[in-house]
């Protein structure tokens, strides 16, 4: 009866095949591990590159925003600087113009006041008598003169008599504005700004009080009113 056990050769082949399979298994596992590691490394590299790209793009946007904000701030500063510089220049020019007009008005007032004082002083002090028309003749026809007023007060027995001459009796009310533009110390009179009673005309007023002589004259006043220069 034949035996069922494998022969020696068959057993040897089986053992060799089994050994090869056992040796190949670790190699395949190692290959699969290496492949997985490569895929993982590739995945990590891709994610890293994408993350780096997003980070670079975000930083660029931040820099653009910061640059825009700085540009706006610089523009605002420049606009404010030139605006304020322009305002300051305009203010300084306005003050310079006002000072120039003030000086022109003062010089005009001095000139006309000298004329009025020389005309009125003899009559006010009683050294010369004259009618109103005679006193005002030299001032008529000059449109710059708004009005001229001479006033004197004299003693008549125990009473006092005040006489007033005016170039234009309808322009008797004016409002002087303090403080004076100029006090002329050597002549002892003031130059002031003024307005008509209806505030429609700017005026320059020069006025001087003349003291009495203690005998027949109580005192008097010379006033000249001019249309202000602009």
Image: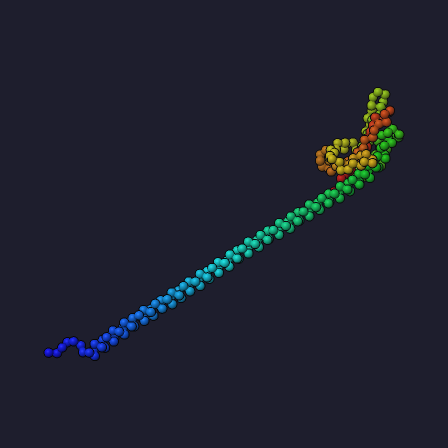
Q: Is residue 82 left or right of residue 114?
A: left
**What x and y, as percent, mark residue 197?**
72, 33
* Residue, far left: 1
Q: Which residue is drawn at 80% across and 41% down?
A: 107
Name the foreground residue: 154 vs 22: 22
Q: In this view, does 107 lie above or below 82?
A: above
Query: Against 53, is 230 above or below?
Result: above
| Closer to us: 55 or 27 | 27
Give coordinates of residue 113: x percent, y percent: 82, 36
Quadrant including the N terminus:
bottom left
Specify whether 185 is left or right of 43. Answer: right
x, y percent for residue 52: 46, 61
Coloring applied to the structure: rainbow
Q: Can residue 141 be seen in this view?
A: no
Most extreme residue toward the top, as rendered? 158
Residue 46 located left or right of residue 201: left
Report which quarter residue 141 is drawn in.
top right
The structure residue drawn at horizontal position 85% and vertical position 30%, both measured from the top left corner, is 124
Q: In the figure, residue 129 lies in which quadrant?
A: top right
Against 213, residue 17 (above or below) is below
Report if residue 67 is visible in the image. Answer: yes
Q: In the depicted view, which residue is nearer to us: 147 or 205?
A: 205
* Quadrant holding the C terminus: top right
Q: Which residue is drawn at 18% across and 77% down?
A: 6
Image quadrant assignment for residue 149: top right
> What x and y, as percent, mark residue 153?
83, 26
Please state which of residues 115 and 30 is positioned toward the viewer in this rendering: 30
Figure disc tally: 0
The residue at the point 67 percent across, 47 percent down is: 88
């Amino acid at each position: 009866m034949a035996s069922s056990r494998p022969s020696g050769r068959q057993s040897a082949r089986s053992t060799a095949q089994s050994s090869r399979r056992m040796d190949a298994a670790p190699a395949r596992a190692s290959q699969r591990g290496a492949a997985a590691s490569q895929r993982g490394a590739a995945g990590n590299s891709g994610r890293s590159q994408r993350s780096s790209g997003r980070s670079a793009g975000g930083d660029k946007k931040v820099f653009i925003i910061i640059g825009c904000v700085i540009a706006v701030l610089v523009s605002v500063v420049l606009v404010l600087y030139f605006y304020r510089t322009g305002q300051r220049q305009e203010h300084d020019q306005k003050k310079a113009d006002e000072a120039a007009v003030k000086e022109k008005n003062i010089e005009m007032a001095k000139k006309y006041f000298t004329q009025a004082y020389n005309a009125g002083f003899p009559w006010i002090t009683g050294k010369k008598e004259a009618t109103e028309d005679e006193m005002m003749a030299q001032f008529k026809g000059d449109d710059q003169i708004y009005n001229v007023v001479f006033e004197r007060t004299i003693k008549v027995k125990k009473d006092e008599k005040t006489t007033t001459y005016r170039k234009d009796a309808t322009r008797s009310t004016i409002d002087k504005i303090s403080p004076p533009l100029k006090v002329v110390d050597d002549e002892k009179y003031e130059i002031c700004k003024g307005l008509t009673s209806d505030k429609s005309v700017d005026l320059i007023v020069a006025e001087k009080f003349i003291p009495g002589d203690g005998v027949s004259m109580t005192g008097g006043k010379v006033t000249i009113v001019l249309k202000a220069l602009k």
